[in-house]
Structure formats: structure tokens, C-alpha cells
Image (cartoon, rainbow, N blue to C red):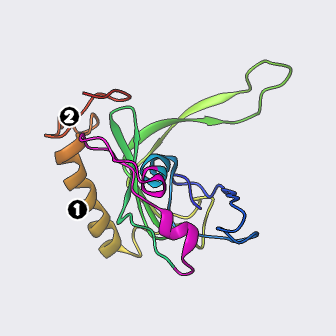
Amino acid sequence: MWDGGCRVPCVMSWPGKIPAGSVCDELAATIDIFPTIAKLTGAQLPAHKIDGLDISSLMFDDGAKTPHESYLMYYGEGLHAIRSGDWKLHFPHGYISIVTPGKDGLPGKQVNRQTGVELYNLKDDISESIDVSKDHPEIVERLTKLADAARQDLGDSFQKINGSGRRKVGSIQ
């Protein structure tokens, strides 16, 4: 399974239900665990909106596809990137990059960096080192439209958009 924008293997074990050694390369994330467990146990989801989706089909059905059309990557209240299929589009934002790792409990050297609008094909470039936005303007446009719709709902502090469905990070109303 995928977790967010990085390829992080997720090992699931359920003897008699999930065959040992099964691999799924579809997009899934920790936000999907709650609705998936609710589905598997027959529990009702809360009335308020949640962001995760049921991914039980990825666990049991060979060839199942992710239920996510896209996956939003917010950090705090700013939309940093959007992922859809093999594609990940970054929006302008600053970030901290580690130059040298820490040692003996002390932090290593870090630098502040900035990214612009950059597109990566994660199937071919998991390290996100080759910006292919100029080669695929139609994908940049499609992902930007999805992101713009999400901003209208969830907001984006980078673009100073409040969003009609915005809710405080980490809380329930």
C-alpha cells in the first residue's frame, strides 16, 4: 500500500483472509484505516465528514483499484501537493531539507528550501527528482483543477482560501 506521497510498504496479516505475501501498489493511507475497520466490523461511521475511504477491496480483491481519485497532502492548513495515480503535483511551498543526518542525539545540518509547481511520475521516479511538468501540461491542469476544488472545500492557507467545509486540524465538531 501507499501511505501519502511516499512508497511505504504496509504489511497486513489476517490468516485465512489475506494471503501471505500479498502486495498492493494502490494508493491508500492511514486516514483510510478507520472507515475500513468500520466497514469490516459493521460499525457505523460518524455523521460528520471524514477524509478516509474504505479500502477493504484492496485487501481482498486482486486487481482492485484505490477508491481515491486523488489524495491531498496538507501540512497544517496549507495544500502542499496532490497525488492521483502515479502522478504527484507539488504547489509552491517552503520545506526543510536535511543536509547531514544527526548524530549522538544532536540534530544534523538542515536548510530551508522552496519548491514551485512541480510534477513527478512516481512510477518512474519515486525519489521525486525529475520535474516533468513541462512535458505533461494536461496532467498539471487536471491535478490543479482537483486541487482547486479541494481548496474551495478545505481551504488553503498558502492561497488565503478559507474553504466552505474547512474544519480545525485534529478536531471534531
Q: Distance between the residues labelled 1 and 2?
A: 17 Å
Per the rendering, the mark at residue 145 is: 1
Mark 2 crowd level (few <14, some 14–19, many ≥20, 10 Å Cα): few
Tell me, yes or no, whether the two marked residues, 1 and 2, touch with CB atoms within 8 Å. no
- Which residue is the extreme one toward the bottom? 63
Residue interval drawn in magenta: 38-63
- Which residue is the extreme one toward the right? 104
Residue pictured at 26% horizontal, 43% vertical: 49
Q: Which of 85 and 145 is in front in this view?
A: 85
Lower sequence index among marks 1 and 2: 1
Residue 134 vs residue 138: left or right?
right
For mark 1, give the secondary structure: helix
Q: Dominant secondary structure of the magenta stretch?
A: loop
Residue pictured at 33% horizontal, 46% vertical: 45
Name the amino acid, label 2. Answer: Lys
Residue 165 vs residue 15: left or right?
left
Please identify the quarter of the rendering in which residue 171 is found: top left
- Which residue is the extreme one toward the front? 42
Q: Which of 12 and 8 is in front in this view?
A: 12
Q: Picture coordinates of residue 129 (x, y %)?
A: 59, 59
Against 124, residue 129 (above or below) is above
Please identify the quarter of the rendering in which residue 77 is found: top left
For mark 2, give the secondary structure: loop
Q: Mark 2 points at which residue?
A: 160
